[in-house]
Image: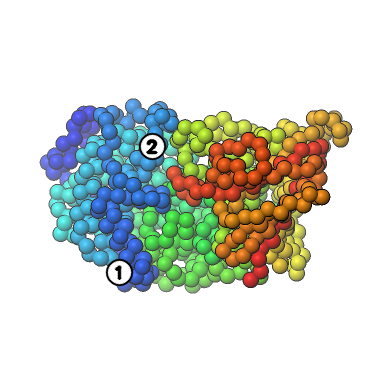
Amino acid sequence: MWRTPGRQDKTWVSQAHTLPPFVVSQSLYPLPEKDRLLRTYDEHCLAGLLLQADTIVAGRVQIFGGEAIPLQLEVPGVQKHWTAYEKRLSAAEEGDIKFIWEVGRFGWAYTLARAYYLSDREQYVEAFWRYTRQFLEANPPYLGVHWVSGQEVALRLMALVFAYQIFAGSAHTTEEDKMLLGWAIAVHAGRIPPTLAYARSQNNNHLLSEAVGLYTASLALSAHPSASAWRRLGWRLFNLGVQSQVTPDGAYIQHSTNYHRLMLQDALWINLLSSHVGGEQFPEKTKNLLATATHWLLSLLDPVSGYVPNLGPNDGAYILPLTACPFDDYRPVLKAASMAFMNEYPFGSGMWDEMSLWLADDSGKHTRIRNIMGKMPTRPPSSLALFPAAAHILRIDGSKSWAFLRAVHFTNRPGHADQLHLDMWWRGLNVARDAGTYLYNASRPWDNALTHAGVHNTITVDEQDQMTRAGRFLYLDWAQAEMVKFETENSVWVSLTARHHGYRRLGLIHQRKVTAYRDGHWVIIDELLPVKRSNDPSPHDKSAFHSARLHWLLPDWSWLLEEEPSTPRYNLKLRSPFGWITIQVDCALGGPGVLQVVRAGELLHGGGEVSPTWGWVSPTYGCKHPALSVAVTMQGYLPLRFQTGWYLPPG
């Protein structure tokens, strides 16, 4: 049994060779053919991979798909037992622990390993072992913040095992390195079980990653006394997690496209190991859910950019970065998952193929090609009625735009107050966008502030949120949505109507109708309708008087405003790379509207108070860019109605 060192005992790395060795398997899965990998790269991409690896060797690492930061593996101060940190990590004054954890996940090890596999440059092997020793020396077993989270430990374990499969044959990998790694994997696996009860209670991506970590350790250290127990426990909990976290239509429990991707990557990794060494096969229920989960995320893929709506919490996680594609591009994961779980190619070949070569079986059995890069049919009414939690999408053949309407009946905890949010995409551009997340742990106003309905493309009423925010990660009084109607006139238009009841406490509901026309323009009608009750107030009762705010988050492009003084209408023109977009907002029912344009927390047009969190978009964790926050507010008696027309340039 491995002993836990004392607080100042940082000699365990140098002493590891005196302990009974745990041999790490170096043949857990077949490595892809180098020539096939190289064919997924052009000269520019390969140079970019080697540059990233050289940057890591020099001591800097890119995290969350953003800017490079120092590769800092030591945490200042005396390292206490991990249990001493559990209740302190959420305090803003302690700083954001995610920036420390992300480096400790060893995501940079995948870059070094891939670069070495394609270039045979030994400096990448030397850097991996140097940094691994540095980390283990500075963070002895179970001491310090890097051991607090079972998920962080599991993800680091997976990275160590992946890298070893490639570095094991190098002359710069010594027998002492191999023994050290064996002990490190054993120590990491031993840390996971004590907090599995917490992971099970949370029932989210933590449980899946920790289960996969245990399963990985069991195969990497097959002779370890606990290997059989780790293997059984990891396999059972992973299947339990998938079956309790993925809905029948494929939506993920955390209401987040990024966490959805993380779940699929966990599934791809454990599927790879079980297929080649473990021998286990997923139960039919797990297989079906992983297939529907892949299809669900595919339905949100923009066919031009490869991006998806920035739905829900986005903590920047990318646990298996086996691609030269940018962080935002979901094609690598979706192609690998489609091949592994749907037995089909969702689109043609490209630079996104690398991940499939590492993680998915490409033995030629995939005979069906469902090319989503071309036309995507509108989802039929039956599936809208059958799966109320599904993504509701309008994709129009012949035009170059599509939209996603967020309408869900929550059966588990929501991360954002985003009912009836609308994402719009045109020619690969996200023209009506979700603000993202930015930071979880920060002082106000950035304490996970982009969860509010007010920053989403929807309506807020009387300056209140759709749901009651009870903490940075907790919403109560869930707003529930439902589909009302699906209509189509094949030669002219197609539309969806949905509503939510988050403002029932104010005596009203919000209903949104989204209509896409074949000529490429869109009309969105928002109505605030009174709740029908036996004691409904009269039309002029003050209790039926409300302030309604319609918000759109737009790209940071040049803009012009055309007001029509004789009508309650505003015409906003945005200069896109493909011509001018016109957004026409009409306050059809209610008092005259007041327009406000905000960029990066600064008021550009109109009056009234401005939140410093308005006018920002966060594509990944810890990163925010200016955007245009356009809001029209009007007051009046119910019913109130906005009409927004989107006119996109032809061609």
For the point 80% across and 33% down, the residue is 544
Mark 1 vs mark 2: give the one in front.
2
Quarter the N terminus occupies: top left
Across and down, in percent, residue 590 comes to 80, 42
For the point 34% across and 27% down, the residue is 84
Q: Nearer the viewer, residue 360 or 460?
A: 460
Q: How many marks?
A: 2
10 Å crowding of disc 1: few (<14), some (14-19), many (20+): few
Please, what secondary structure does the residue beneath circle 2 have? helix
The answer to which image quadrant residue 478 occupies is: top right
Left of 221 or right of it: where is 372?
right
Left of 504 or right of it: where is 228?
left
For the point 35% across and 50% down, the residue is 68
Q: Is residue 648 above or below residue 443?
A: below
Q: Looking at numbered disc 1 in the image, what kind of residue is underneath it?
A: Lys
Q: Nearer the viewer, residue 637 or 204?
A: 637
For the point 39% across and 28% down, the residue is 88
Q: Which mark is residue 312?
A: none
Q: Which mark is residue 97?
A: 2
10 Å crowding of disc 2: few (<14), some (14-19), many (20+): some
Please, what secondary structure does the residue beneath circle 1 have? helix
Residue where numbered disc 1 is placed: 34
Q: Looking at numbered disc 2 in the image, what kind of residue is underneath it?
A: Ile
- Kindly give the residue lying farthest to the left in the view shown: 18
Q: Is residue 95 above or below residue 368?
A: above
Query: Does the rendering let one see residue 218?
Result: no
